[in-house]
Image (spheres, grey):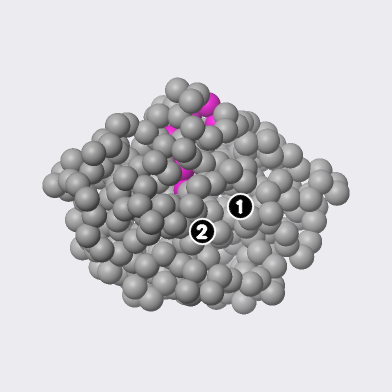
């Protein structure tokens, strides 16, 4: 696809004064696991004909970079199950540093469940990726299989070590779940500290219908943090990603503990991100349904169409999500995290 030269280089600012510098891309809604809090066992996925092509993802991403985005995270679904993901990583990696189109990407990164990380880690490093987030809610094989419905944790741990050996910095993402992994949070933090990994704890969010009531599993991180404070020396770390996490240094090491608590601590004031789905929809907030169709805009209007749609999206970016979790509340939005790219 050939596009007209870009005219609209204006920075991405929303109507609440926030500058958007971070694009998350869900490269596929498919996943090789079925985490119980994330999706139903019989989840249906988009037909391939509806997906953005690799070329379209790259064009959209590069347009965002030209307009000031400096960080891109590939997510999903499971990004590493998309067949052409290695090619996409390589293509986007070319935008790190000045990309010759008026933009400059500072960081390309990925969130993965780790099942295929061992096969991909070296190519990711070659493409310029330096850090990955790996989701692992338990290191216990049986629990891991239960929560993911059929995952093998040894594959994930193998992927984590392969990624570290390839030179990637690792952050473990762990969703804190009442009655499931409460007793594993402190051991997970100790393991991360000893291995030189960071750990982010995440509160379960009311996104998409699942086969159970999330309220039963909701574990407020305020309480978890208090308990961790009894066992570790936690010093507030000024580290800011512009993201939702607040960080603490652990026991004077380089390990950071991050808390992502959308339910107990709203973090929307500093929101610097938007999210592109694999179908080409741009969501301005994980917790709202407002979206613009960048696939149609690109196909019908090229760069100018894309810019117009991006501007319309920014105009509609809400001030805050309004997640609530309570008995019988149901999901705040019908979309699963795997669609918007968690
Ligand atoms: N497949 C990749 C992975 O497992 O990391 C990327 C996509 S996954 C949707 C991204 C993150 O979202 C994972 O850490 C997962 O645990 C988390 N997640 C999924 N659904 C969630 C929910 N309803 N509430 C909180 N976290 C959720």
The relative height of residue 148 versus residue 12 in the rendered view (above or below) is below
Q: Is residue 164 visible to the viewer in this orientation of the structure?
A: no
- Establish if 32 lies above or below 283: below
Magenta stretch containing residue 241, yes or no? no
Q: For marks 1 and 2, give the CA distance.
A: 8 Å
Q: Is mark 1 within 8 Å of ligand 1?
A: yes
Q: Which residue is mark 2?
A: 135
Name the residue located 50 percent from the left edge and 24 percent from the top edge. Answer: 16
Image x and y of residue 114, in percent? 45, 66
Q: Mark 1 or mark 2, which has the lower sequence index?
A: 2
Could you tell whether 321 is left or right of 180 in the image? left
Tell me if I can see residue 28 in this picture.
yes
Report helix, strand or loop for mark 1. Answer: strand
Could you say where residue 305 lies in the image, as x and y percent from the top left?
A: 36, 47
- Decide if ligand 1 comes within 8 Å of the CB at mark 2: yes
Identify the residue at the far front of this view: 300
Q: Is 272 part of what is drawn in magenta?
A: yes
Q: Residue drawn at (69%, 54%), measured in percent from left and top?
A: 334
Q: Which mark is residue 175?
A: 1
- Please tell me in which quadrant of the rendered image residue 146 appears: bottom right
Query: Of all residues shown, which one is farthest toward the left?
Result: 100
Q: Residue at x 66, y 64 (%)?
A: 39
Give, as a single range, the part of the protein colored magenta: 268-275
Q: Indicate left or right for 185 with 5 as reference.
A: right
Residue at left offset 62%, top offset 57% = 336
């Amino acid at each position: 696809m050939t596009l007209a030269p870009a005219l609209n280089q204006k920075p991405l600012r929303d109507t609440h004064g926030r500058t958007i510098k971070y694009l998350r891309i869900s490269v596929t809604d498919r996943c090789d696991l079925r985490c119980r809090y994330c999706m139903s066992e019989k989840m249906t996925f988009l037909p391939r004909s509806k997906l953005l092509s690799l070329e379209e993802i790259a064009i959209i991403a590069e347009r965002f970079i030209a307009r000031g985005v400096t960080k891109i995270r590939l997510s999903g679904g499971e990004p590493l199950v998309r067949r052409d993901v290695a090619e996409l990583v390589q293509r986007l990696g070319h935008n790190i540093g000045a990309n010759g189109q008026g933009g400059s990407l500072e960081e390309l990164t990925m969130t993965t469940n780790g099942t295929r990380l061992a096969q991909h880690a070296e190519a990711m490093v070659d493409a310029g990726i330096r850090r990955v987030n790996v989701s692992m809610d338990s290191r216990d094989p049986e629990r891991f299989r239960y929560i993911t419905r059929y995952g093998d944790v040894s594959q994930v741990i193998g992927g984590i070590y392969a990624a570290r050996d390839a030179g990637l910095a690792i952050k473990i993402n762990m969703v804190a779940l009442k009655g499931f992994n409460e007793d594993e949070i402190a051991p997970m933090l100790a393991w991360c500290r000893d291995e030189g990994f960071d750990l982010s704890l995440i509160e379960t969010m009311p996104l998409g219908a699942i086969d159970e009531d999330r309220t039963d599993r909701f574990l407020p991180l305020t309480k978890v943090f208090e308990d961790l404070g009894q066992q570790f020396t936690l010093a507030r770390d000024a580290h800011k990603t512009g993201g939702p996490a607040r960080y603490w240094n652990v026991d004077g090491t380089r390990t950071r503990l991050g808390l992502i608590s959308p339910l107990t601590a709203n973090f929307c004031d500093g929101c610097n991100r938007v999210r592109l789905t694999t179908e080409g929809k741009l969501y301005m907030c994980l917790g709202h349904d407002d979206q613009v169709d960048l696939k149609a805009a690109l196909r019908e209007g090229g760069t100018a169409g894309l810019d117009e749609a991006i501007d319309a999206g920014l105009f509609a970016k809400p001030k805050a999500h309004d997640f609530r979790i309570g008995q019988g509340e149901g999901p705040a939005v019908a979309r699963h995290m795997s669609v918007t790219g968690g």
